[in-house]
Image (cartoon, rainbow, N blue to C red):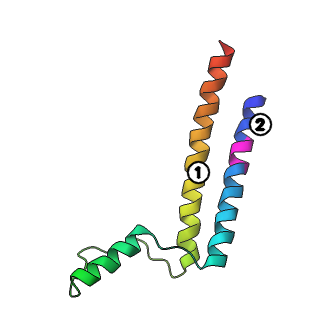
Amino acid sequence: MKEKRYILLIFASALIIVLIQIMISLNTGGFTGTDDQAVATIQEIAPGYEPWANNLLEYNRDWIETTLFAFQAALGLGIILFYILKNRNKKTAK
């Protein structure tokens, strides 16, 4: 029963983190990632450069990209916490 409570707590925490990230990004206008910084640097160095590959998915709204990134971070955090708690429970059971 305790294990289900921990799992629920992890996913609730991940959801709260995602919602906080969405609220912050909507109020601040998003943030610039390293991909955008790399594109700007390449355009400064070689203005005529054209990429040889395109993105598989193009989003027409900035908040979608931010939301997916926040969800990925929260999911990763949830998985890490799950394994930490699982190993801790194994050690205490011995």
For disc 1, the neighbor class at 10 Å (few under 14, some 14 to 19, many from 20) is some
- Tell whether position 61 is magenta: no
Q: Is residue 10 magenta?
A: yes
Q: Amino acid at mark 2?
A: Arg
SS state under label 2: helix
x, y percent for residue 69: 53, 63
Which image quadrant for residue 5? top right
Seen from the viewer's position, the closer of residues 42 and 51 is 42
Q: Are marks 2 and 1 in contact (CB under 8 Å)?
A: no
Q: Which residue is mark 1?
A: 75
Judged left or right of residue 94, residue 31 is: left
Find numbered disc 1 in the image and state the secondary structure of the residue it sits on: helix
Q: Looking at numbered disc 1 in the image, what kind of residue is underneath it? A: Leu
Where does the magenta region start and end?
8-12
Q: Residue at x 38, y 74 (%)?
A: 37
Picture quarter containing residue 55? bottom left
Q: Quadrant of the N terminus?
A: top right
